Image: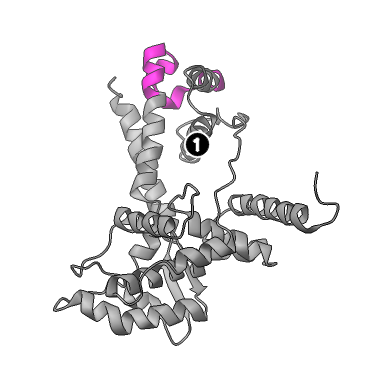
Amino acid sequence: MTVSEANVRMLDGFVDTLWLEDGLSRNTLISYRTDLTLLAEWLGRQKRANGLLSDVTQADLLAFLADRIKQGIKASTTARALTCIKRFYRYLLREGKILADPATNIDSPKVSRHLPVSLTETEVEALLAAPDTQQPLGLRDRAMLEMLYAAGLRVSELIGLEISQVRQDMGVVRTMGKGSKERLIPLGDEAMHWLGLYLEQSRPVLLAEKHGNVLFVTARGDAMTRQAFWYLIKRYALQASIMKTLSPHTLRHAFATHLLNHGADLRVVQLLLGHSDISTTQIYTHVARERLKQLHGQHHPRGKL
């Protein structure tokens, strides 16, 4: 269904403002626009609010959300859409395009929080030891895995690193995360050791005659893709006999969980992960508590339920 020109102009203004003020990624902006376009199309089909996003009432929004739930759309997806809608109407109110915010008192649907799959410290050690470091590619992979675990990087941050972002003299990496937020993360001796070996022995071989600023390169001397690196992790997990279903964030989850298990402050972990909201980081306290329960059950004389 075609969205009216008036709605398109409102969406353009909103998305431009998000980009200018928050520096949100292209994918996030597309997601926001898609959610609001679905609302605009629904208004047109239901003949509500004159088909205009600016004429919406709270009843319209509640009916839209109820319709999504009736269709079987996941609560997490609906909650995300509502977050976008709330932000859009705050923007319209600020711009003077509406007199009252119709989304103000609408609560998000309750979303069950799935604990992220993490690895034990023993499993991490096995995974990190899996690459054959006698080979240039294996040495590169060991350095990448060590950095991923030592710094809690997102895979996209890891493969996008340039040499200038690593300070070997200081043992830190500077990375740009979501929303163009920069953070400085210590790497630790082990990760710095493998990174140094890679830069000295492996990278020059892989680059051959090529030149480039990308830190981790492929056998052809090019930048690695997210998919290619993730294939490597799954292959090394099999070699290490790790049967868990891994995700692109598994080592990042392990980084956060193991820090908390060893007494790190939640706020410190938040800064290291680059989370803008502490509530995002708090899920790892649940993972850490589950691990403590398991240890209690295994080792306390009265720990068995």
**Image side of residue 301 versus residue 8, left or right:** right
Q: Estimate the x, y position of residue 35 in percent, counting from the top left.
A: 41, 32
From where the camera sits, is residue 110 visible?
Answer: yes
Q: Reply above or below: 87 against 166.
A: above
Dominant secondary-structure state across the stretch colored magenta: helix
Q: What is the quadrant of residue 266 in the picture?
A: bottom right
**Which residue is painted at 50% across and 36% down in the image?**
80
Q: Estimate the x, y position of residue 87 in percent, counting from the top left.
A: 50, 39
Quadrant of the drawing holding the C terminus: top right
The reply to whether the magenta stretch includes residue 137 is no
From where the camera sits, is residue 270 visible?
Answer: no
Q: Reply above or below: 170 against 70.
A: below
The magenta-colored residue range is 40-60
Residue farthest toward the left in the current orientation of the protein: 209
**Image side of residue 166 versus residue 283, left or right:** left
**Which residue is painted at 37% across and 16% down in the image?**
44
Amino acid type at circle 1 is Arg
Q: Estimate the x, y position of residue 184 in percent, counting from the top left.
A: 49, 72
Residue marked by disc 1:
80
Residue farthest toward the right in the current orientation of the protein: 302
